[in-house]
Amino acid sequence: MLENIESLPDNARVWIYQSDTKLSDEQVAKATKDLRSFLEAWTAHGTTLKAGFEVKYNRFITIALDQSQAAASGCSIDSQVRFIQSLQAELEVDLLDKMNVTYYQNDRIHYKPLMDFKKMVKAGAVGKNTVVFNNLVTNLGEYREHWEVPAKDSWHSRFLRK
């Protein structure tokens, strides 16, 4: 059952998929259409799942699931991953590589492989107050409050100079 993501509770589970490139408006429209279709039909053991999504900054796809009525099962999570794999093939982008960092610099969003980000930290090009996207948040409340945070307040802090 497709819901507006804004209406879902803070404890709704989230999955964040970041694109390796900024999506065009046409790609966002395609992703939105496909996400609507997928989530309207998404089930766990035959039970309809109450879920919503958003595409932010033409780069991030966030899926949220209200588990108060029905929780995601292994099979439903697998179907979500297969859907994302299919979507990334259609859009010709990478949505599943977790070894990359997306951050703000000079009022723009940048995307770098983790190794390049580490080099930038070492060179002083990014620092503890650089705003990063913490895609490891696990629920909608964390997503709303702690997704865009200074690197010092995220898992990225392990790479900062002490």
Image (cartoon, grey):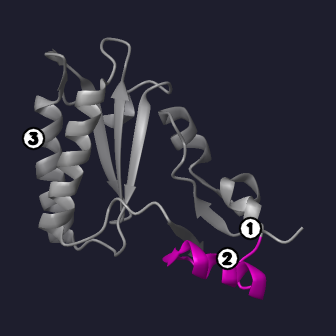
Q: Amino acid at mark 1?
A: Phe
> Which residue is at the front of the view, 89 or 25?
89
Which residue is labeled 3 in the image?
A: 37
Res 41 quadrant in image: top left
Can residue 3 be seen from the camera position used here? no
Of tags 3 and 1, which is closer to the observer?
1
Question: Depth check: 136 or 82 in front?
Answer: 82
Residue designated by label 1: 159
Q: Is residue 92 left or right of residue 152?
A: left
The quarter of the picture where residue 103 lies is bottom right
Q: Position of residue 91 (x, y in %)?
A: 17, 68
Residue 100 falls inside the magenta stretch: no
- What is the C-alpha distance between the residues marked 3 and 1? 40 Å
Residue type, numbered disc 2: Lys
Position in image of residue 28 (x %, y %): 21, 62
* Residue tagged 2: 118
* Residue at the image position 24 percent from the left and 41 percent from the top: 80
Query: Element under label 2?
Result: helix
At 23% across and 74% down in the image, what residue appears? 24
Q: Is residue 24 above or below residue 46?
A: below
Report, in whole angstroms, how far the alpha carbon at label 2 lies from the one at label 3: 39 Å
Q: Position of residue 49 (x, y in %)?
A: 23, 22
Residue 122 versus residue 161 in the image, above or below = below
- Let me know if residue 109 is in the magenta part: yes
Q: Earlier in the sequence, mark 2 or mark 3?
A: 3
Return the mark for residue 147: none
